[in-house]
Each structure stands twice: as C-alpha cells, then as structure tokens.
C-alpha cells in the first residue's frame, strides 16, 4: 500500500508535503533514521517491529541469565562460608560433605554458570542479533524502531510541550513551548 495525503500508514495519519516526507512541519517529524523508507509496506514494518520486539525480549532474558550467573556464584561463595562456620561449630562431618558435594558443583553437565552465559552469548544471542540486523538492513534500510516511531507519531499530541517528534539539537523537548 502506497501512502498518499490523508491516508493512514499503520496507525499514523500521513500528510504529503512538497518534500514528500509526509508531514506538515519539517521541524516536527521523526528523525530520518526512524522514518519508513519509501515503498515499505505496513506488514513489513510490523514484521520487523515484531522481530525487534522479540530481540528485546531475548536481551531481557539474557539479563536474567547474567543475574542467574551472579546469584549462583554468590550462593556458592556463601555455602563456602557456611562450611567454615559449620566446622567452627564442631560439625566437621556435615561441613566436609557439603564442601565435597556442593561447593563448586557444576550447574549443568561440565558447566559452571559462566560457561552457560558464554555459550548463550556466542550461539543463540549472536545468531538472534545478526538475523534481526539482517532483516532491518534488507527490509527497512537498516533503520531501527520504525514501527515504534510510527506508533509515537500516532499517539503524541502534535504541537504540545513534551510531545516533540525528536529532541532538539540541545537534547531538550521544546515542542509547543
């Protein structure tokens, strides 16, 4: 679907101007890196947006994996401290068993958590990032967050303070001020 003046592109009203950029106010439009490339259809923008959303979800999961890594490492050190205290309290047999069976135990066969993190990063996460980037490059000119930028255009109040399309050159939001 090609947009023309008065049409909606996604959920965004499209107004064609002489420069063909689809806005009435050249100072109040998304930055070029967030604009839909000419001829890109709604379904494509939505699909790339959904893939990027999935990437963001994976990155959140990766953060939880790093939390898991740090928490298990901390727990292992705390178990070591508990072993020392058990020994000091005269419970050497139990302390020895815990030290032998639990301290330094692999969380998965042959792996401590750092190895799980490394395998995830080098395999799944790297592949995911690469394919998401490839989709953006091939389908929307490498632009990031085109779907979200269009959503912002449809949801913001044009001409109102705090609702500018992009920050000004000094990094502020002077829209409507």
Image (spheres, helix red, strand yellow):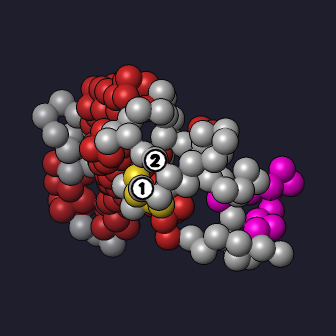
Residue 7 seen in this snapshot: yes
Quadrant of the rendered image containing residue 47? top left
Q: Quadrant of residue 117?
A: top left
**Quarter location, residue 175:** bottom right
Provide the residue span drawn in magenta.
Answer: 165-175
SS assignment at label 2: loop
Prevailing secondary structure of the magenta residues: loop
For the residue pair 39 and 6, the one nearer the viewer reads as: 6
Residue 93 is situated, as x and y percent measured from the top left of the image, at 18, 59
- Residue 30 image offset from top left, x and y in percent: 62, 50
Q: Residues within 10 Å of mark 1 (few under 14, many from 20)?
A: some
Tell whether label 2 touches label 1 (CB within 8 Å).
yes
Q: Which residue is mark 1?
A: 7
Quadrant of the snapshot with the N terminus: top left
The stretch drawn in magenta includes residue 17: no
Residue 100: image x %, image y %? 20, 46
Tag shown at residue 4: 2
Q: Residue at x 80, y 55 (%)?
A: 168
Horizontal side, residue 108 vs residue 121: left or right:
left
Marks 1/2: CA–CA distance = 6 Å
State the quadrant of the C terminus: bottom right
Name which residue lies at 42% across and 45% down. 3
In the image, what residue occupies the spot 37% across and 28% down? 139
Q: Residue at x 77, y 73 (%)?
A: 176
């Amino acid at each position: 679907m090609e947009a023309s003046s008065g049409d909606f592109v996604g959920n965004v009203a499209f107004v064609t101007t002489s420069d063909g950029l689809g806005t009435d106010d050249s100072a109040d439009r998304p930055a070029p890196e967030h604009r839909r490339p000419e001829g890109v259809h709604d379904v494509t923008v939505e699909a790339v947006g959904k893939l990027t959303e999935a990437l963001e979800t994976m990155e959140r999961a990766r953060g939880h994996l790093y939390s898991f890594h740090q928490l298990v490492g901390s727990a292992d050190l705390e178990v070591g401290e508990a072993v020392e205290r058990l020994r000091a309290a005269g419970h050497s047999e139990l302390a020895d068993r815990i030290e032998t069976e639990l301290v330094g135990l692999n969380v998965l066969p042959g792996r401590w958590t750092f190895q799980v993190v490394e395998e995830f990063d080098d395999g799944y996460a790297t592949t995911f990032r690469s394919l998401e980037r490839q989709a953006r490059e091939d389908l929307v000119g490498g632009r990031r967050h085109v779907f979200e930028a269009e959503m912002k255009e449809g949801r913001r109040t044009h001409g109102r303070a705090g609702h500018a399309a992009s920050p000004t050159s000094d990094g502020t939001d002077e829209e409507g001020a």
